[in-house]
Image: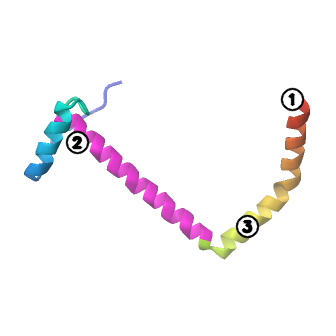
């Protein structure tokens, strides 16, 4: 399935455009457009990972959340042990 695209104009520092053209000439991307799209996807993914990392760090410092996780772990400990034993018996 073909992605919908939108034409836009970017103003870039000369050095970035030069480096992009070099990368394209070395076969790292098929075109400037592909290279810029890949770079944007990479950067947006990094932003998303940073958001997730920040949320996880916040949860690690949240005493109420940690207490809830400990309670759930205790509640599921027996079931987890039983599942492990059943799995070992099937081998």
Magenta extent = 32-60
Q: Earlier in the sequence, mark 2 or mark 3?
A: 2
Residue 44 at least partly seen: yes
Mark 3 surroundings within 10 Å by alpha-carbon count, few (fewer than 14), some (14 through 19), many (20 or more): few
Tell me where residue 87 sits by quadrant.
Answer: top right
Task: Write the residue at 33% across / 44% down.
Answer: 41
Residue 9 at least partly seen: no
Which residue does the numbered mark 2 point to in the structure image? 36
Task: Write the residue at 20% across / 31% down.
Answer: 26
Q: Name the image quarter holding the C terminus.
A: top right
Overall secondary structure of the magenta section: helix
Task: Write the residue at 28% across / 45% down.
Answer: 39
In the picture, measured across the screen, residue 45 lies left or right of residue 32, that is: right
* Residue 23 x, y percent position in the rendering: 20, 37
Which residue does the numbered mark 3 point to in the structure image? 68
Q: Are marks 2 and 1 in contact (CB under 8 Å)?
A: no
Q: How many marks?
A: 3
Which residue does the numbered mark 1 point to in the structure image? 91
CA–CA distance in space, label 2 to label 3 = 44 Å
* Residue 25 x, y percent position in the rendering: 16, 31
Determine whether 42 is above or below 66 in the image: above
In the picture, measured across the screen, residue 1 lies left or right of residue 71, that is: left
Determine whether 76 is above or below 89 in the image: below
């Amino acid at each position: 399935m073909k992605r919908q695209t939108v034409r836009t104009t970017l103003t870039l520092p000369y050095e970035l455009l030069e480096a992009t053209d070099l990368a394209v000439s070395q076969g790292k991307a098929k075109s400037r457009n592909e290279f810029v799209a890949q770079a944007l996807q990479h950067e947006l993914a990094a932003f998303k990972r940073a958001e997730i990392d920040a949320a996880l760090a916040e949860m690690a410092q949240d005493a109420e959340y940690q207490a809830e996780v400990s309670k759930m772990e205790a509640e599921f400990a027996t079931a987890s042990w039983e599942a492990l034993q059943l799995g070992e018996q099937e081998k």
